[in-house]
Image: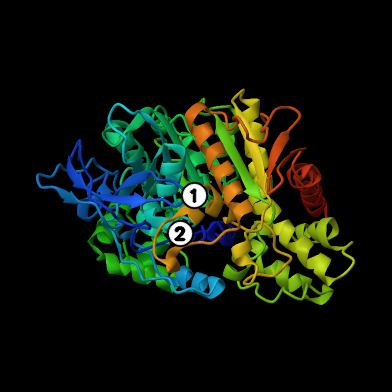
Amino acid sequence: MASCKETLLLLTLLGTLCLVTSDPQGSPTTNPRVQSKHGWLEGLQLNVKGTDRTVNAFLGVPFAKPPVGSRRFARPEAPEPWNDVRNATSNPKMCLQTMDAFKILETIFEVEIPTMPASEDCLYLNVYSPSEATRDSKLPVMVWIHGGGFTMGSASMLDGSPLAALEDVVVVSIQYRLGVLGFLSSADEHAPGNWGFLDQVRALEWVKESIQDFGGDPNSVTIFGESAGGVSTSAHLLSPLSKGLFHKAISESGVLVYPGMVTDNMNIIRNIAHNIANKSGCESTDSASIVACLRKKPEEHFLDLQTRERTMFLPGFVDGYFFLNSPEKLLKAKQINQLPHLLGCNDDEFGWILPNLMNLTDLRNGLDKENVDTAMGAVRGLLGTEPEAFHLLKKEYLDDAKNSSERRDNFLQMVGDIMFVVPTVVRARYHRDAGLPTYLYEFRHAPSIFRRLRPSYVTADHADEVYFLAGSAFLDGPPATQISLTEVEKALSKTMMKQWANFARSGNPNGAGLPVWPLYDADEKYLVIDLEPKVEQKLKDSRVTFWTQTLPQKLQEAQKQRKVV
């Protein structure tokens, strides 16, 4: 499997449940039809609260052939056409995954999550477009890539009907292979890997060739995603395969910068493949034989494997096809697709959900000095294994804490900084330094719907912004499926939807009646998104300097001293 650091890093990139549903949100009124490149589709027409506009939703649209049999561990292929009218009124099966993380989220959110079927046959997408849109409308297209640590998630995690109705855009949410089936690589021609990323490319190809049938403009496509979805959007900015398939990118609480998520180390990749082969009863060490053996396994085998191993995150591989080099080298060489990038994070990313997912559940009353080592040990894979690192981190974040509450808050900020804040700022600087339009934000509002559930010290937690930019308060369906926000929160939601849609329209989130959002330039100004928005400068600058300069320098010095001794 991946190293401890890699596994923990991507495990904690789990996108929260947000809007997962087994059935589409909204009130179906009629069944619209559309003729796509591959055949006729019959969908749903949905209402959206706060507007008299309706949205046509086409769910479970195939964008590739089922990746089964010989197409397992292979590049996705365009779908076959169909002759009859295809029913597109229900969400597709999720890509193969366990429900383990969903069960944890059930406990955290105190809700019952319906069991959703999962299948290896999962390369489908959902399309939401204003019902009056025609082929000549050429509306901006926003393609959502779900989060979930590359091990869980689905297209149904985002209902695009509010965004489509309120902002006059076409929203597409896609699925991609996950875990072993999505990222196994033999580091050679037999299974180069990156299948999940290639599925996303294939979905973008489908958008380019078919979205006009739904009223969208194939020449105005924005990809956006949260957590692992944000990592994905930032990956496409580095891949030649994605060039020309989209025109703007938004990364929320997740970017690709450092090693761990993608590696060029063939030994690491081969060891992972051999480990999986051994656990699967494929005893050969020959790549061709391993891949052939794994292709014969039933899909239930991989579900059992993921259940036994708890998480099956596998890093991406520098395959010379999707990734021509490591992300760091590409960024340093300014080999970036020349497009605008909007990116940001929340101010309490490691506040509530992620600590619970990592079994750090006893922090409500603070963090006592005697428990610091235990807490840091729980996130050791994120912080590094060098003995000097713990000492330096304690000195930077914890030693000056006045009490256990402040020590806990500083600990949570420390983990959030290395996981999200620092990579986001570093990636924004790379994009800016390449001379490309860059917009940075920090989301700071704690949704009122969670006041009863989570501790008061938690502000904007991981994925909190998704409720607002997705317009979840405007979903029209049964009371149990609705999310209640205050009137000022609804106004914030409309503002964020407008900013995201403006960026999709023009590459600039600014507009009449909106708070000024400056370009991220040498002054490093960014927008604080809150009930009372404001512009600030140099996001967590001292912490970014500590992680990118001070800590590496001190660790290097310590390593030299050890060699001398």
Residue 299 is situated, as x and y percent measured from the top left of the image, at 28, 64
Q: Is residue 52 visible?
A: yes
Residue 281 is situated, as x and y percent measured from the top left of the image, at 31, 69
The residue carrying mark 2 is: 19
Task: Choose between 421 and 58: the one closer to the eye.
Answer: 58
Residue in the picture at 72% in, 73% down: 363
Task: Choose between 123 and 452: the one closer to the eye.
Answer: 452
The residue carrying mark 1 is: 470
Residue at the extreme top = 435
Label 2, label 1: how many angstroms apart (C-alpha)?
A: 9 Å
Residue 279 is situated, as x and y percent measured from the top left of the image, at 37, 69
Point out the tag, 2 or 1, that comes first from the N-terminus. Answer: 2
Q: Amino acid at mark 1?
A: Ala
Q: Quadrant of residue 358?
A: bottom right
Label 1's element? Answer: loop
Q: Quadrant of residue 387?
A: bottom right
* Tag 2–tag 1 contact (CB < 8 Å): yes
Residue 476 is situated, as x and y percent measured from the top left of the image, at 41, 57
Q: Amino acid at mark 2?
A: Leu
